[in-house]
């Protein structure tokens, strides 16, 4: 540690030496949902649609068809190595998938330029909070690294019904914070300039969410 940094930290500690003890926060918020599964799913769908995400329902018999329809007849899309490949449609002459290895130390890790050239990304998800309409990605094998979900313009995200909860505390309990976490609440958008909504500013312009009944 440099001497300048040590000096700064020493001054901070000195300034805080006589600070009062912070009171214990009151945690009287709800931690367990009282909604059933259907009510929770309905709330999540309502929030996602309000955020301008597209929502679809699928099961193991038709999920590949739903994903194919969202990809279109002509596209190149990226998937993480750990994604369930049974979810995906077969490649065609005009539609093909590229697998990202997830690490710059391994072959098959796409560069940012290569990611920018693909049309879409398909991933799984860790948990989804119905209360806030937020999907959590925890860098699991079926979600891949953050870059593959932030660079492509179109994100198709599979949300298993069993991973949908109502409350934020319930969501947080399912997250591992030793790995990067990405929280998605609709397509990337901002209204900073003259309150005009612009989508695709710092992430995908289009978010398709597939509620998956395994």
Image (tube, rainbow, N blue to C red):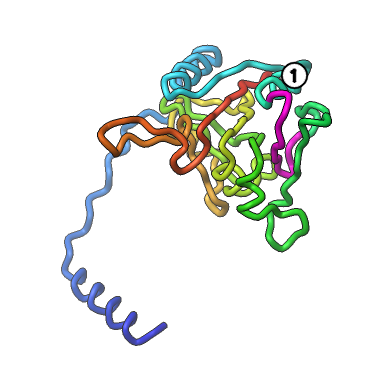
Horizontal relation, residue 81 to residue 181: left or right: right
Q: Nearer the viewer, residue 42 or 80?
A: 80
Query: Which residue is painted at 64% across and 47% down in the image?
Result: 115
Q: Position of residue 92 (x, y in %)?
A: 83, 29
Q: Residue 81 colored magenta?
A: yes
Q: Residue 163 colored magenta?
A: no
Residue lying furthest bottom: 3
Image quarter where the C terminus lies is: top right
Question: How many labels sit on residues?
Answer: 1
Q: Nearer the viewer, residue 103 or 5?
A: 103
Q: Nearer the viewer, residue 8 or 176?
A: 8
- Please determine whether, in this image, residue 182 is positioned above or below residue 198: below
Query: Which residue is painted at 76% across and 29% down in the image?
Result: 88
Question: Toward which corner of the image does residue 5 lie, by quadrant?
Answer: bottom left
Query: Which residue is painted at 76% across and 54% down in the image?
Result: 108
Do we see residue 58 in this rendering?
A: yes
- What residue span does the magenta drawing correspond to? 72-84
Other residues around mark 1 within 10 Å, as few (<14) / some (14–19) / many (≥20): some
Q: Position of residue 165 (x, y in %)?
A: 51, 26
Residue at numbered disc 1? 65
Image quarter where the N terminus lies is: bottom left
Horizontal relation, residue 154 to residue 102: left or right: left
Horizontal relation, residue 22 to residue 163: left or right: left
Q: Position of residue 52 (x, y in %)?
A: 45, 23
Query: Which residue is painted at 72% across and 17% down in the image?
Result: 59
Do we see residue 34 in this rendering?
A: no
């Amino acid at each position: 540690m440099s001497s300048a940094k040590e000096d700064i930290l020493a001054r901070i500690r000195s300034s805080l030496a006589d600070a009062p003890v912070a009171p214990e926060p009151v945690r009287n918020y709800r931690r367990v949902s009282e909604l059933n599964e259907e009510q929770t799913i309905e709330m999540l769908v309502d929030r996602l649609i309000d955020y301008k995400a597209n929502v679809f329902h699928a099961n193991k018999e038709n999920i590949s068809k739903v994903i194919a329809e969202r990809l279109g007849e002509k596209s190149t899309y990226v998937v993480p190595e750990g994604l369930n490949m049974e979810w995906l449609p077969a490649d065609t002459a005009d539609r093909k998938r590229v697998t990202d290895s997830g690490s710059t130390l391994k072959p098959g890790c796409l560069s940012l330029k290569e990611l920018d050239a693909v049309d879409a990304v398909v991933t799984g998800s860790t948990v989804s909070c119905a209360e806030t309409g937020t999907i959590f990605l925890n860098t699991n094998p079926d979600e891949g690294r953050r870059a593959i979900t932030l660079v492509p313009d179109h994100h198709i995200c599979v949300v298993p019904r069993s991973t949908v909860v109502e409350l934020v505390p319930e969501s947080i309990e399912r997250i591992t914070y030793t790995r990067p976490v990405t929280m998605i609440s609709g397509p990337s958008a901002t209204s900073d300039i003259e309150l005009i909504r612009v989508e695709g500013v710092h992430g995908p312009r289009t978010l398709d969410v597939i509620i998956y009944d395994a």
